[in-house]
Image (tube, helix red, strand yellow):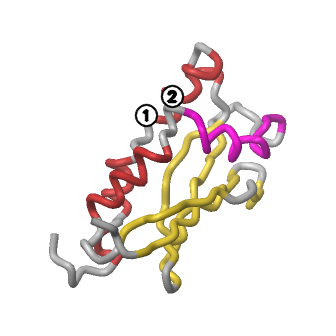
């Protein structure tokens, strides 16, 4: 991969959709409830921007038709996401590191608290900390 590409050119919406596909929401609810139809939201991963040695992304949780997100436990979701094997944050970090230039690697990450943008959209910030890769 060419080192002169910006993060925005590398982590495009299509690339993020490939490494965190929409199907993952159904897989998550299948694992959680035994039935993907029980899920109240769809998920997507979005790059918000880069600030210094930090990449800001967010999980956007979008209410499914006929479901109620405000009646759900979306505020506890960051703790669940951080360790759930279907969400697989460590695997997601490995995928992102493969895509980033050699001099830009994710060394740590942090999930923020759920923020209610509207009753139909909740957001969970995901901060990736960048550093030099040790060989």
Image coords of residue 47 (percent x, y): 47, 67
Residue located beneath label 2 in the image? 26
Image coords of residue 121 (percent x, y): 68, 53
19 lies left or right of 4: right
64 lies left or right of 51: right
- Is disc 2 placed on a helix, strand or loop? helix
Q: Residue furthest top?
A: 34
Q: Quadrant of residue 134?
A: bottom left
Does the segment drawn in magenta span residue 45? no
Does the segment drawn in magenta span residue 83? yes
Residue at the spot 37% in from the left edge and 75% down from the top edge: 132
- Cβ atoms at labels 1 and 2 below 8 Å apart: yes
Quarter of the picture holding the C terminus: bottom left
The tag on residue 23 is 1
Quarter of the picture holding the N terminus: bottom left
Q: Residues within 10 Å of mark 1 (few under 14, many from 20)?
A: few
Image coords of residue 111 (percent x, y): 64, 56
Position above or below: 2 against 114? below
101 lies left or right of 83: left
Q: Which residues are magenta?
A: 71-84
Q: Residues within 10 Å of mark 2 (few under 14, many from 20)?
A: many
Residue at the spot 55% in from the left edge and 29% down from the top edge: 28
77 lies left or right of 54: right
Which secondary structure dominates the residues rendered in magenta?
helix
Residue at the spot 42% in from the left edge and 49% down from the top edge: 92
Image coords of residue 93 (percent x, y): 42, 54
- Is disc 1 placed on a helix, strand or loop? helix
């Amino acid at each position: 991969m060419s080192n002169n590409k910006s993060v925005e050119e590398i982590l495009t919406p299509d690339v993020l959709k490939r490494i965190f596909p929409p199907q993952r929401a159904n897989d998550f609810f299948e694992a959680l409830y035994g039935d993907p139809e029980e899920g109240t939201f769809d998920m997507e991963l979005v790059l918000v921007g880069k600030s210094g040695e930090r990449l800001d992304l967010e999980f956007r949780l979008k209410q499914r038709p006929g479901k109620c997100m405000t009646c759900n436990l979306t505020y506890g979701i960051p703790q669940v996401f951080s360790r759930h094997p279907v969400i697989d944050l460590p695997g997601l970090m490995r995928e992102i590191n493969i895509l980033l230039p050699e001099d830009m690697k994710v060394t740590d990450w942090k999930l923020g608290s759920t923020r209610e943008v509207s009753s139909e959209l909740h957001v969970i910030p995901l901060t990736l900390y960048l550093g030099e890769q040790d060989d």
